[in-house]
Image (cartoon, helix red, strand yellow):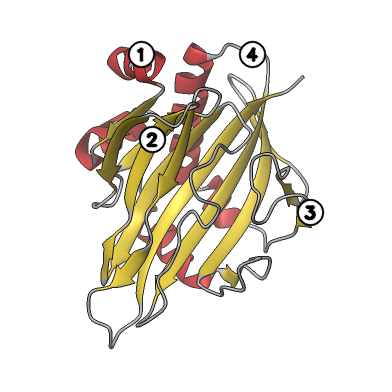
Amino acid sequence: MIDLTETIRSTGFAFVHADAMRALLEAGGPLTDWEAFAASWDDLGTDTYMADGGRYRKRRHAAFRVYADALERLPPQPHYQSRDYNQLNGGIERWFQPVLPAVASGPTMTAVFRFCSSLFGSLTPTRAWFAEMHQFRIEARAGVDGKPTPEGMHRDGVDHVLVLLIGRRNVRSGETSVHDLTGRPLGSFTLAQPLDAALVDDTRVMHGVTPVEPVDPGEVGFRDVLVVTFKRES
């Protein structure tokens, strides 16, 4: 964890391979519900707020208050980003289906929150965080690429971001790139294996992901990720 903290302090981001990420997460508890956790991505609702007219994104959402030693799920609420951070879909309250209780409170998600609280707390000490959990599925069909970041290179308007790959099937590409706030490229990588992870200091860098397209155009492909954002409470 010390090396990871120093990497993010130095560069503003980190890419963590699946085997190392599993070890980091399991320090907070075994991922005994991983199969059911990953399968829950088969039960997401269509994102109907896409200003580009696309119907390639499915998602669920939940909000939390996170302390160093406690986690509180908040009542359902909209996800909001200003247009300063999301020129495509920002500026409105977006209501999504809530993350199912068993998914949000199960062993895997508990381990994820413990990991994030510890890492982000070491980078940005604070009394409490406002955290959001997003389950995303990006679908790709023949002639219709799926866009993981349809808003382009962007910041999320928070302090820290975890992007954890849950799975991908019948898709190519989906390369993540990270730039500094002047637009200078800092690095790129592809989340390819379940539990590959990207960690981003959202106050210092921007990130984006290239569209995914089906390998076999006769079949629907998809890219499933968990996105967790942490923002200091004022």
Q: Are marks 1 and 3 in contact (CB under 8 Å)?
A: no
Residue annotated with mark 2: 178
Type of amino acid at the residue the image marks with label 1: Ser
Q: Are marks 4 and 2 in contact (CB under 8 Å)?
A: no
- Near mark 1 (Cα within 10 A), the count class, few <14, some 14-19 or many ≥20, is few
Answer yes or no: is residue 33 visible: yes
> If you read the primary sequence from the N terminus, does the residue marked by circle 4 or circle 3 appear first?
3
Nearer-N-terminus badge (1/3): 1
> Which kind of residue does numbered mark 2 sit on?
Val
Of the two numbered discs 3 and 2 on the same chain, state the one appearing first in sequence: 3
Mark 3 is surrounded, within 10 Å at the Cα level, by few (under 14), some (14 to 19) or many (20 or more) other residues, namely few
| Residue in front for this viewpoint, 30 or 53 | 53
Secondary structure of residue under mark 3 = loop
Residue 14, given in percent of the width and then of the height, sits at: 33, 28
The residues tagged by marks 4 and 2 sit, at their Cα atoms, a distance apart of 26 Å
Q: Which residue is mark 1?
A: 10
Contact, CB < 8 Å: mark 1 with mark 2?
no
Left or right of residue 219: residue 113: right
Labels 1 and 4 touching (C-beta < 8 A): no
Residue 29 visible here? no
| Kind of residue at disc 3 | Ile
Q: Which residue is mark 4?
A: 126
Disc 1 versus disc 2: distance between alpha carbons?
14 Å
The C terminus appears in which quarter of the rendering?
top right
Q: Which mark is residue 92?
A: 3
Residue at (39%, 45%) from the top-left corner?
164
Q: Residues within 10 Å of mark 4 (few under 14, many from 20)?
A: some
